[in-house]
Image (cartoon, rainbow, N blue to C red):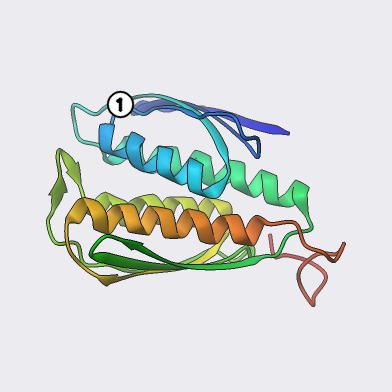
Amino acid sequence: MTYQINRETKETKIAIELSESQESSHIDTGVGFLDHMLTLFSFHSGLHLNIDVDGDTWVDDHHTTEDIDIVLGQLLLQLTRDKKHFERYGQQYLPMDETLARAVVDISGRPYLNFNAQFSKEKVGQFDTELVEEFFRAFVINARLTVHIDLLHQGNTHHEIEAIFKAFARALKQALRPSEEARIPSSKGVIES
């Protein structure tokens, strides 16, 4: 099944499709580094993405980054509500050369982000590294996930961020894996919403 949202504000015009297919993703955000991270996220999560964005990048990359993640989170929430039977929890340690990141995901229905990463530099190319936390915060709130992200070893800033995106994607893939038990993965019988 393919999920799609089009969102338009005075700052951004966004069209995103998300599915669990194995097709190649198409990602054009107007922000080169974000395109790269979303391509990695798509590959390592197993989620197919079609993303087209026209944003006010002449101001900076903040609105584009945050608005993409609002929509991505909403799409993931739709997917998890339809899916119903999934493992729910995922965790991943991921090295990227000298750096090491850890991500832990709970598809809980209760949005919470613990983001513990001090990046070596304030920018990668033109991309402000403070936007990485903004990316995950908007995603987590809208997808209603509980997520803990830790950068355990620093190094090259590009590697630091890449390790985080890959760790999160692989933890999410694990959490989305179909459960062997055909029931909602909660002792309450419901995922909060």
Q: Residue furthest front?
A: 97
Percent across and percent down for residue 125 are 14, 40
61 to the left or right of 167: left
Quadrant location of the N terminus in the rendered image: top right
Residue 154 versus residue 157 in the image, above or below: below
Q: Is residue 114 visible?
A: no
Q: Nearer the viewer, residue 160 or 134?
A: 160
What residue is at 76 percent from the left and 72 percent from the top?
A: 186
Q: Residue furthest right?
A: 182
Quadrant location of the C terminus in the rendered image: bottom right
What residue is at 46 percent from the left and 58 percent from the top?
A: 168
The tally of labels here is 1
Answer with the quarter of the image where residue 5 lies: top right
What residue is at 73 percent from the left and 65 percent from the top?
A: 191
Residue 46 versus residue 54 in the image, above or below: below
Q: Nearer the viewer, residue 85 or 186?
A: 85
Q: Nearer the viewer, residue 64 or 42?
A: 42
98 to the left or right of 121: right
Packing grade of label 1 (10 A; few <14, some 14-19, many >=20) is some
Q: Nearer the viewer, residue 159 or 135?
A: 159
SS class, disc 1: loop
Percent across and percent down for residue 64 are 34, 35
80 to the left or right of 103: right
Percent across and percent down for residue 79 are 68, 45
81 to the left or right of 14: right
- Residue type, numbered disc 1: Gly
Residue holding disc 1: 30
Answer with the quarter of the image where residue 97 lies: bottom left
Percent across and percent down for residue 119 are 19, 62
Q: Is residue 67 visible?
A: yes
